[in-house]
Amino acid sequence: MANCNFRRHLAALEGDAACLRANVALRTLHSSSSSANQQQGDVAPSDSPALRARVTPAIEGRLREIEARHASLVEQSLAPEFASLSPQEMARLQRDIAELEPVAEASRRLAAKRGELAEVSRLARDEGEDAEMRALFASERDALAAELPALEHGVLLSLLPRDAADAGGVVLEVRAGTGGEEACLFAAELFAMYAAYAARRGWRWEALELARADAGGLKLGSAALSAPRGAEGVFGRLKFESGIHRVQRVPATESAGRVHTSAASVAVLPEAPEVEVEVRDEDLRIDVYRASGAGGQHVNTTNSAVRVTHLPTGTVVAIQDERSQHKNKAKALKLLRARIYDEQRQAAQRAHSADRRAQIGSGDRSERIRTYNFPQGRVTDHRVGVTLHGLSSVIVEGQLDPFIDALSMDHQMKQLASLGTEDN
């Protein structure tokens, strides 16, 4: 249903959604079919610092602190005073417990295994035992020792920073950049690509804003994406998509056959939890006005368009896609909350990064992250050096998982490498 809604919006935008997909297919006709499924990328070497990370004495100390903190929070949640907390305070306490639980549990498992190993090692050395028993204890000791590296690795993984927003939905924004009409067409294709990816993942897609370009395509497209209950969060999958996406191809209006380069920017904003982002009515200025552009008989006859201004931050959101003022206002408030929440998160991350010795990926949206080369039929992600041939499978069918999986693994490897060296 969500994808059908998107198709209706896109049909109004381009006249027919199929035209856009046919245009992409025609552009990729000359790409080599023999390389359609090729992929190349960097593989972490076996001597990667991430794979050499160990539980150091400093990390041991951190584990003890986390276990104590977790126990204290659990005790607070069971105290009678818990019922008197505000919804925000309750949610924050429960979230903190959930974040620390994996670390505390992994640490307890490691400590228990080490205790077993110490006892069995003592028995293997006990002169009071006969040779046969000592041999059995020695064999058990070796088996227990072989289990320790995996448990230590599990502890290190549990210590990696968890982003609470990973489990939630997102507001996706695609903006045309440099390149004029061609950039607007590319922005529309990217927007369609993410709609296709959302459909592949079974996510709900709700178009929020579509700013149409006069010559076709999109100046700006935004949508809210959410996953079914119990499924992997949307932000955790899409957060690495933020940045500058570049396209290289011959525009339809180019008579000399020269390849042009255009760009579009993608922003993935985590959906703001109700209990964490408070938007007070007195902080809002809401203006209504008559919508402009395509929209049928109600356009320019009713005040259906809505512009919401958040006075403390100056953030402005305008929505006019729906004929209903109420629906436009609801969409505008959702987008406003996401932008405010994203700015708060970025400010906190900047403050935290200033105190870290090694920053793990800035996620700077001004960074060029991916190039879609139509003449060669390939897509390259510059951050992890992964190239996929068969461009239409990516931009038409939304087959983004190879990039997203590689980016997630790369991010985790860098975090592990930092964790293993930051206390040296």
Image (spheres, helix red, strand yellow):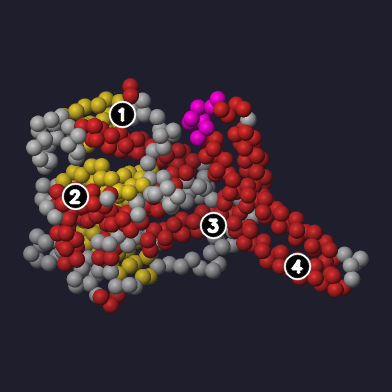
Query: Mark 2 and mark 4: span between their CA atoms?
Result: 65 Å
Does dot 2 land on a helix, a strand or a loop?
helix
Identify residue type, mark 4: Glu
**Residue 46 in view here:** yes
Viewer-side residue, 244 vs 63: 63
- Against 90, is 217 above or below? below
Residue visible at 24% across and 35% down in the picture: 327
Residue visible at 31% across and 44% down in the picture: 224
Identify residue type, mark 1: His
Does dot 1 land on a helix, a strand or a loop?
strand
- Against 142, is 110 above or below? above
Tag nearer the camera, 2 or 1: 2
**Does the magenta stretch mainly form a helix, a strand or a loop?**
helix
Q: Determine which residue is flagged by label 1.
A: 310
Query: Mark 3 and mark 4: span between their CA atoms?
Result: 32 Å
Q: N-terminal of the two: label 4 or label 1?
A: 4
In the image, the segment drawn in magenta is 84-91
Position of residue 150 measured from the top left corner of the image (x, y, whole percent): 62, 62
Q: Determine which residue is flagged by label 3.
A: 417
Q: N-terminal of the two: label 3 or label 1?
A: 1
Q: N-terminal of the two: label 2 or label 4?
A: 2
Q: N-terminal of the two: label 2 or label 3?
A: 2
Query: Mark 2 and mark 3: span between their CA atoms?
Result: 47 Å
Viewer-side residue, 344 vs 177: 344
Q: Determine which residue is flagged by label 2.
A: 8
Q: Determine which residue is flagged by label 4.
A: 140
Few, some or many C-alpha atoms within 10 Å of disc 4 (few <14, some 14-19, many ≥20)?
Answer: some
Tag nearer the camera, 3 or 4: 4
